[in-house]
Amino acid sequence: MEKVRMGIIGIGNMGTCHACNIKDGRCPEIELAAVADINPKRLDWAKENLPDTVARFDDAIKMLDSGLIDAFIIAVPHYLHPQFAIEGFKRGLHVMCEKPAGVYTKQVREMNKAAAESNVKFGMMFNQRTDHIYRKMKEIMASGELGELKRTSWIITDWYRTQSYYDSGSWRATWSGEGGGVLLNQCPHNLDLWQWICGMPVKVQSNMHFGKWHNIEVEDDVTTYVEYANGATGTFITSTGDAPGTNRFEILCDKGKLVSENGKLLLWKNKVSEREFCFSCKEGFALPENEFSQVETDGQSPQHCGVLNAFASAILHGTPLVADGTEGINGLTLSNAAYLSSWKNNCRVDLPFDCDEFESHLNALRKNEISSSENNGFKNPEGKYSSRWKVNW
């Protein structure tokens, strides 16, 4: 095989992006062979904008069974990610899954089990792992040069969205269609990076506001607190209602501090560890000396194309993936735990949590939402009944 014959399930926003990147030659070891979508308008777009050699299917399973593809990208609403991944594993097809891995960890565990039993490559579209700033943060933290973790803090509120955004798709911002709000749609990349760089916590406590800034049923404002096994603490604050927003990721360790903000990575390195200084210094108001620098990086952020090129190379040459698909459960575990905490009156949730309990809460919300929708229970700010809560997938 000289090129990977790629299929795409779902040619909405992200599927279209991937199709165009491949069509325009940004992924030289990939050939776009087929696309599938249940929306006839999207298939019409494919006919008009993609090469005649790209087969079009109105049923994803037909595409998987066609023999035309070696691998495929899953770019459909969240609940369907594990389902289509498992169908691919059954057929010996390589799978690249858009974020998030799924909506709840129980279904993702089933997906990961199927992946382990297959003999194919399975990747997650965690394109932010290719960003030069986050790669450098990962490198510095993995080296141990900053000592033991003490505190993490990420305020990521530059995800601003208008009501028009939420009204643009029937599956958006619904428990039954999307499975959540800002944590599950906008923040999977951030949650993945947070745990990738800093490690997984052991306790999660969260306060969420549902439809605080928009006419939606899911969360659009979140403050989450975590604790790590060594006693370190962390906060994760996000919203789609802040303008202007902020994106500041700070990691404090025993021997220094890293801050990512405004496209820069700043580093403070203590000349002696804070813990040593605290108990050896005889001056009550003294501070440990540190050296400050702006960290140089390679400046490269290949993003989606970088992930797909690594995926193709893994299939053709056995080289590493940007993110193994089985790692998708980590960030999802954080968001699931945060939801569960909020649903249970902001109580502390220990990891691992009861995934059946989470699914029970989620299903109750889905059932209530669908029932209310059928009875015209949801209204937009103008008072007109909204039909966007009904999902076509």
Image (cartoon, grey):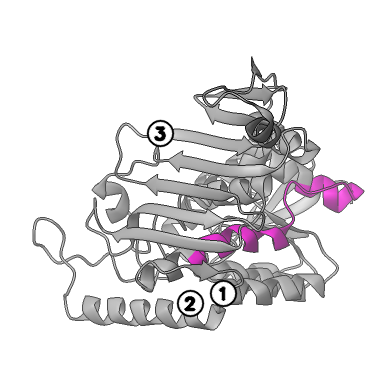
Answer whether residue 29 is visible to the viewer in this image: yes
Q: Mark 3 to mark 1: distance in Å?
A: 31 Å
Magenta stretch bounds:
311-337
Q: Is residue 351 left or right of residue 186?
A: right
Viewer-nearest of discs 2 and 1: 1
Residue at mark 3: 246
Q: Is residue 286 above or below residue 201?
A: above
Residue at mark 2: 358
Q: Mark 2 to mark 3: distance in Å?
A: 30 Å
Residue 160 coordinates in the image, percent (x, y): 34, 41
Query: Contact, CB < 8 Å: mark 2 with mark 1?
Result: yes
Residue 167 included in the magenta stretch of the image: no
- Give the mark nearer the N terminus: 3 vs 1: 3
Q: Residue at x 49, y 50 (%)?
A: 187
Residue 213 coordinates in the image, percent (x, y): 24, 50
Residue 57 coordinates in the image, percent (x, y): 58, 65
Q: Is residue 329 left or right of residue 37?
A: right
Q: Residue at x 60, y 25 (%)?
A: 265
User: What amino acid type is highlighted by mark number 3?
Assistant: Thr
User: What amino acid type is highlighted by mark number 1?
Assistant: Phe
Q: Secondary structure at mark 1?
A: loop
Name the residue at the front extreme: 282
- Quarter holding residue 128: top right
In terms of depth relative to the viewer, which is nearer, 323 or 48? 323
Q: Secondary structure at mark 3?
A: loop
Residue at mark 1: 353
